[in-house]
Image (spheres, rainbow, N blue to C red):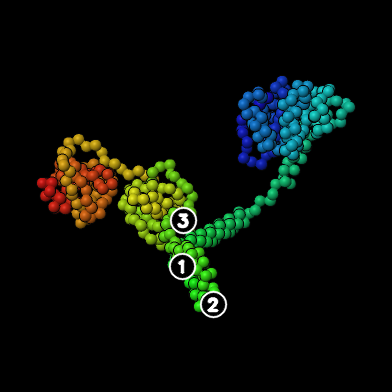
Amino acid sequence: MGVMANARGFAADNRIRVFVSHARADTGFADQIGAFLHNAGFQPLLDRYEAGGAGWEERLGRLIEDADALVLVLTADSANSDLCVWEVEAAQRLGKRVVLVLPAPLHGAARELAGLNTVYFYSDPSVANSGFYDGQRRLEAALRGAERLRAAAAPSRPSPQDEARDARRAEAQARKQERKLRKAEQRELEKQIRRATAPRFPVLGVAFLSLVAAAVVGVIMKPDLLNQARASWINLTSAAEAITAEDPPYSPMDVSVQEYAPERPLYAGRNGANVRDYPLTTGELILEAPPRTPLRVTGRRMVQGQWWFRVTLEDGRVGFVREDVVTFSAPPVAQAVAGVTDIAPAVEVTAGRAGAKVRTAPRRNARVIVRVAAASEMQATGKIREGAHWWLRVTLADGRTGYVRDDVVTAESRTALSL
């Protein structure tokens, strides 16, 4: 025996679900029990597959767990079936009501099945209320008991208005708690920064000078202390060097972060990204990274509900960028264009007063790789005529290549290229 729910599946209503367990030889009688249960307002769950396949025990356990009661068609075959006994024991462990249905007289039933609620579907003068009709009535009554148990165990359901009110309260409480956590995190981070950057009162230095002054006064007042003062002078000098030594300057590496390496490269966003020395907008600006600048991420920290990424710049400096000014989308790259005349050696050109859009191809509708600022220097390595303009193939300072139109570079640059 394996597991199969009836063709209707698990109904999304409140009908009592009854798992009908039986031996394969008793399938016909089990189908009749299932039809009766369906007509009586129950939802029968019948098993159809052979046991022993992969996952049969898990499927059976899940079906029994979903059922409200178990009906076992008890015959000689099912009474001696280890699987039937296992199903009954599983239902009992889960607190399900178990009812045994006997379609015919049975002798020597399995000891594990003795003492359970039994319904006789055959006529026996020695058994009161036996027979097919009385058996149906007793079976329905036994299962209605399971219905009452389920109703008693089910918690009372609050009204929609109460649920909506509780949901609003929980949401407001969550927002309040989140604001408290953000403020506490910001205070702690600012405290760390102030502790690392604020000037310190030289308490130890003052204490050292006081000791020296006391020693001098003692020597003057008591000349016999001179030798002791000389002996301790070396120790005091060493202590002075340690006391007056300057603390190392603050470094972004002092901020504790979660080690993090993204699966994809990270780039400055389309408007660039400000790199700061600690993960707050009040941090000192280290670099205004141009749009689409590659960023090497070495860690991250959550501050006020947003991630700040710790990045290492090309010159070795370390800083932080906020998640909303960066992107994981790789920047577009220049296309291979036929017909470009090489410029050798390369000629240095300068972006005009409005800057210059570097595109992937010599067309105005081509994607923009990056917009360089006014007076930015580029190396022109090729040119091609498109319509009324020349397009220059340029190489940027970071090594990227693209195309700019001749009217976005300075007049001096066009003269140098003889355009």
The image position of residue 62, as x and y in percent, is 65, 34
Query: Residue at left 26%, top 41%?
Result: 334
Does residue 317 lie above or below 241 as drawn?
above
Query: Residue at left 82%, top 27%?
Result: 111
The image position of residue 238, as x and y in percent, is 48, 63
Query: Residue at left 62%, top 40%?
Result: 12
Looking at the rendered structure, the kind of residue marked 2 is: Lys
Residue 106 visible? The answer is yes
The span from disc 3 to disc 2 (Cα, nearest Å) is 52 Å
Q: Is residue 47 left or right of residue 336?
A: right
- Nearer the viewer's eye, disc 1 or disc 2? 2
Q: Earlier in the sequence, mark 1 or mark 2?
A: 1
Instruction: Identify the residue position indicated by label 2 in the image.
Output: 222
Instruction: Identify the residue position indicated by label 3 in the image.
Output: 255
Q: Secondary structure at mark 2?
A: loop
- In the picture, the quarter occupied by the N terminus is top right
Q: Crowding at label 3, few (<14), some or many (≥20) Cα neighbours within 10 Å?
A: some
Q: Quadrant of residue 400?
A: top left
